[in-house]
Image (cartoon, helix red, strand yellow):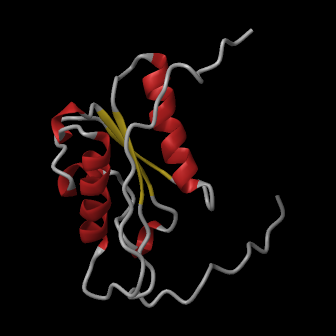
Amino acid sequence: MASGISNKVVIAGMGCARFGERWEAGPDDLMIEAFTEALADAGIDRDRIEAGWLGVFYDELSVGKSAIPLSVTLRLPNIPVTRVENLCATGSEALRGAVYAVASGACDIALAMGMEKLKDTGYAGLPERSKGSF
């Protein structure tokens, strides 16, 4: 039987970009803002982060199909980064990846970040439902 991970992982810090009409701020600006706050909240330096997960639901609108913007924008070039997408649970999926990495002992400190910027992209809403069956 699984022993669980509740005593193996701690969320040490959290950051969030300011909400509102941020026409002047691009995806990179919002990621830096949230990341800087999270580092300050955790009381750690960026060089202690050993892996990162970036959750982006609609890749065509913001950062693309890879997690490279996470490592480039946040200046974390020498760590493995993974981009995840899971519809409305995308942020949770990024967090889950980071939690499992720490719980398994693959790393001691992992970063999970969610990123979306929709209002200045011309995005008109969710895509039309699939006409196929599942």
Q: Is residue 121 above or below residue 32?
A: below
Q: How many marks?
A: 0
Could you tell me residue 109's position as x and y percent?
A: 33, 30
Q: Quadrant of the C terminus?
A: bottom right
Which residue is situated farthest in the right direction here?
133
User: Picture quarter containing residue 26?
Assistant: bottom left
**Is residue 96 found left or right of 59 in the rendered image?**
right
Taking depth in this image into account, of 96 and 126 the one nearest to the observer is 96
Q: Is residue 133 above or below residue 93?
A: below
Could you tell me residue 100's position as x and y percent?
A: 51, 28
**Is residue 39 found left or right of 118 in the rendered image?**
left
**Is residue 84 found left or right of 2 in the rendered image?**
left
Could you tell me residue 126's position as x and y percent?
A: 62, 79
Residue drawn 59% across the image and 85% down it: 125
Residue drawn 36% across the image and 35% down it: 110
Residue drawn 63% across the image and 79% down it: 127
Could you tell me residue 8's position as x and y percent?
A: 50, 20
Taking depth in this image into account, of 35 and 13 the one nearest to the observer is 13
Q: Quadrant of the N terminus?
A: top right
Q: Is residue 17 above or below residue 103?
A: below
User: Picture quarter containing residue 117?
Assistant: bottom left
User: Picture quarter containing residue 33?
Assistant: bottom left
**Is residue 89 found left or right of 42 in the rendered image?**
right
Residue drawn 39% across the image and 59% down it: 65
